[in-house]
Amino acid sequence: MYGKFTEQYPTCALKFLYNHIKQPDSRKENAPFWDGRAVCRTGNCVSAKLIIDHINDRQPTDQEDVVVHVTVRGKCTHVRTADELEFNVDMPNRRQLSGMQHHKTGDVINTSATSATEMHFSKLGQLQKDEVAAGNVTVCQTPSILSQVAYERRMSERLHPNAVLELDIARKCWQSSVVGPTIPGYIQQLGLQPFHVVFYSEQQVRTYVDACKAGDAVIHCDATGSVMSSLPGQKRLLYYCFLLCNGSLPVVDILTTRHSGDWLHRLLLMFNSSVRRLTRGRVVMPKQVVTDFSYALMSAFNGDMTIEALYTLM
Ligand SMILES: [Zn+2]
C-alpha cells in the first residue's frame, strides 16, 4: 500500500495507525471494504485516509485490481526549499523494511557480490528528487540496517544454530529428497573429529563416470578457506572442490579441518568406491588431474584411483 502511495506522494514515509477490513457479517452497510489511517512518521505533518470500496457489493478477491481512494490532510512540512539549508524533524522520515521487502533485500545481499554499503549507495542514486528534498529515505536504508536485514535473513534460513547439527539435518533432508537408485542423498559422509563433510550425488558420480569412459575427463582441484566459521578446538577449515573441466561441474566437494594427503586420499577413496558401485567394479580414471602445487592435493591423488592421471600431470 505504501509503495503505491509513495508513487503519488513521495515526500512522506507513512506510519499506519489503523487498518480495518469489513467483516462479511458486519451490520455497517455503508462501511468500505478496507479503511486505513496513516500519518507521516516525522511528526507534525500530513495525515492520510485510505479507502478501498467493495466491488459491486462484494469483497475483492486475491490478485484483483482495486481502486484506493486517498485523502491527504495538511501540507508537508519538511520539503526543503531552495533557500533553506536544513529542516528539523522529530522522527526519521523512513519506514522500516518489512515483509517481502525485508526478504528480498536480505536475499540480494546474501546471494550476490553486493555489500550492504554498495547497496546503500546504489539506492541513494535511485532516490527521486522529491524524496531527496523531503528527506524520505525509505528506499535507501542505512548500511547498518541493510547488514542487519541480511544477517536476520541468513539466521531465519538456518535449520539449527549449531553448524554440525544443521549439516546433519540437511543430510537427512537430502537423503529423503535426492533419491538415487544406488547412491541416495548429497552429504555422503559427516564426521566430527576431525570435522569433515563429503558432498556428492549419484548424478555427479554418473557424470564423472561418463566423462572418464569418454576418455576426455580433466579434473581441476583446488582448496579455499572462509566458507564457514571456524570450529572450536579444530584447525582451519578448508573447502576442497573437484571440478570437471568440461562444463565446470563439481563431481565431489569436501569440507574438512584436516589437510594431510593421506586423509584427503582416504576421503577420495570413498568417492571411488561409489564410482565402482556404478561401474560394477570397473575402475575408471580421468585423463588428467590439474592442481596447484599443493602437496596434500597431489598426494591425495596418488592412489589407485588416479595414479596414471598423476603421471600424466608430472
Ligand atoms: Zn511528512
Image (spheres, grey):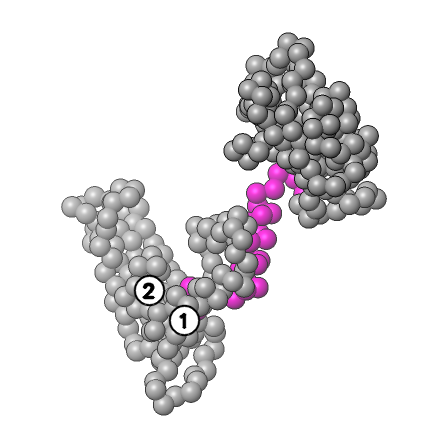
Q: Residue at x 34, y 85 (%)?
A: 81
- Residue 93, horizontal then vertical, whole percent: 44, 71
In the image, residue 13 sits, relative to residue 35, either above or below, namely below
Q: Is residue 73 magenta?
A: no
Q: Is residue 153 magenta?
A: yes
Left or right for 203, reference 280: left
Q: Residue at x 51, y 62 (%)?
A: 118
Label 1 sits on what residue type? Asn
* Residue found farthest to the bottom: 83
Magenta range is: 136-162
Label 2 sits on what residue type? Thr
Q: Residues within 10 Å of mark 1 (few under 14, many from 20)?
A: many
- Circle 1 sits on which residue? 136
Residue 241 seen in render: yes
Q: Residues within 10 Å of mark 2 (few under 14, many from 20)?
A: some
Q: Residue at x 34, y 87 (%)?
A: 82
Front position in the image: 236 or 306: 306
